Image: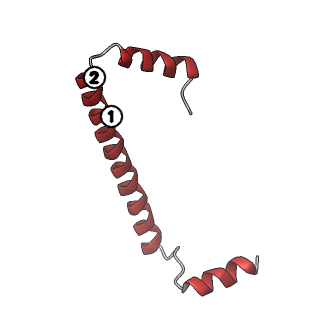
Amino acid sequence: MSVEPAKFADALASVETLPLEDQAALVEVVNKRIAATRRREMIREIAAARADYRRGNVKRGSAGDLMRELRSK
C-alpha cells in the first residue's frame, strides 16, 4: 500500500460514516476513476511503443526466438 496506514484508516472510517447507498456510490465513482486512470496509462504506453516501433527500437520474432535470446544471456 502506498498511502500511510493512518491516512488509509482515516479514509475508511470516513466512508463508514456514510449511509450504505452513498458508500456504494462512492465505490462506483472510485472504480470509474481507477479505470479512467488505467486507460490513460495504457494510451501513454501504446504511444511510447508506437514511437519505439517507428524509431526501429523493436525486434520481431517468435516466442521461441525470445526464449532463445533470454537463455543466451
Q: Residues within 10 Å of mark 1 (few under 14, many from 20)?
A: few
Q: Quadrant of the N terminus?
A: top right
The residue that label 2 is drawn on is: 20
Height in image: 24 above or below 70?
Answer: above
Circles 2 and 1, Cβ within 8 Å, touching? The answer is no
- The first of marks 2 and 1 along the sequence is 2
Q: Residue at x 27, y 22 (%)?
A: 20
Q: Residue at x 56, y 83 (%)?
A: 63
Height in image: 39 above or below 56?
Answer: above
The residue that label 1 is drawn on is: 30
Height in image: 70 above or below 10?
Answer: below
Count of marks placed on residues = 2
- Left or right, 48 with respect to 64, comes to left
Specify the quadrant of the image occupied by residue 44: bottom left
Q: Residues within 10 Å of mark 2 (few under 14, many from 20)?
A: few
Between the C-alphas of marks 2 and 1, the distance is 15 Å
Q: Residue at x 34, y 49 (%)?
A: 40
Mark 1 residue type: Val
Q: Of residues 22 and 5, which is closer to you in this image?
A: 22
- SS at mark 2 in the image: helix
